[in-house]
Amino acid sequence: MVHIKRVPELVERALQVASQHGFSSSCLDEVGRFLQILGGFKSGAKVAEIGTGFGVGSAWILSGMDADSTLFTVESDPDRVSAVREMFSGIENVRIIAGDWKLILRYAPFDYVFVDAKPAKYDEADLVIRSVNLNGFIVLDDFTPMEHWPDEWKGTQDLVRDKWFNDDRLLCMELRTSEKNSILLARRVK
């Protein structure tokens, strides 16, 4: 039997805040562990999160980053921004941006971007890709492995996967985080 370390304290706090607000769209723990691992891939990294929610993904990323790295996270909902600012007060290496996701682009280029907002995953994906340093990483979550697609999805084109897998600036793969959930991981190579 494998014993998995408990969830970091900052993540527990973010999960509690999300629960108090009835927010059920936070990243899964399995995705969070991946974000935590990638958060520490480079000392002094500039990391971006597009779609803060109530800070669960941010907390996972922060729990893996070193003190010389900085997380920039953007959220359009003012109530969520307020709650996250309060929760992360006193943490020096996080910048919480309120408003449209594109406001984060003024802080680019980034070494690592976690995309959890729909327009940035497809319609405006090019802006995300251009905001990442060469050899930087992009993570997109909330994917369902194709064998678990509902009947109405079967035989249809997955435009988001097509976009990310077929962009010649990227190396991209899908990683299963649980039986019915996966992420896309891309590295910018051009």
Image: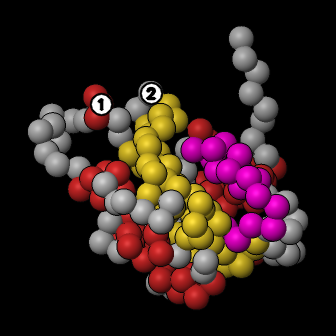
In magenta segment, residue 35: yes
When the figure is inspected, residue 179 is found, relative to residue 14, above or below; the finding is above
Q: Residues within 10 Å of mark 2 (few under 14, many from 20)?
A: few
At horizontal 79% and vertical 32% (from top left) the residue drawn is 5
At horizontal 38% and vertical 64% (from top left) the residue drawn is 121
Residue under label 2 = 179
Left or right: residue 125 compared with residue 54: left
Q: Amino acid at mark 1?
A: His
Q: Amino acid at mark 2?
A: Glu
- The stretch in magenta equals 31-47
At horizontal 81% and vertical 50% (from top left) the residue drawn is 9
Q: Are marks 1 and 2 in contact (CB under 8 Å)?
A: yes
Compare residues 70 and 17 and report the one nearer the observer.
70
The quarter of the displayed image where residue 74 is located: bottom right
At horizontal 74% and vertical 27% (from top left) the residue drawn is 4
Q: Which mark is residue 148?
A: 1
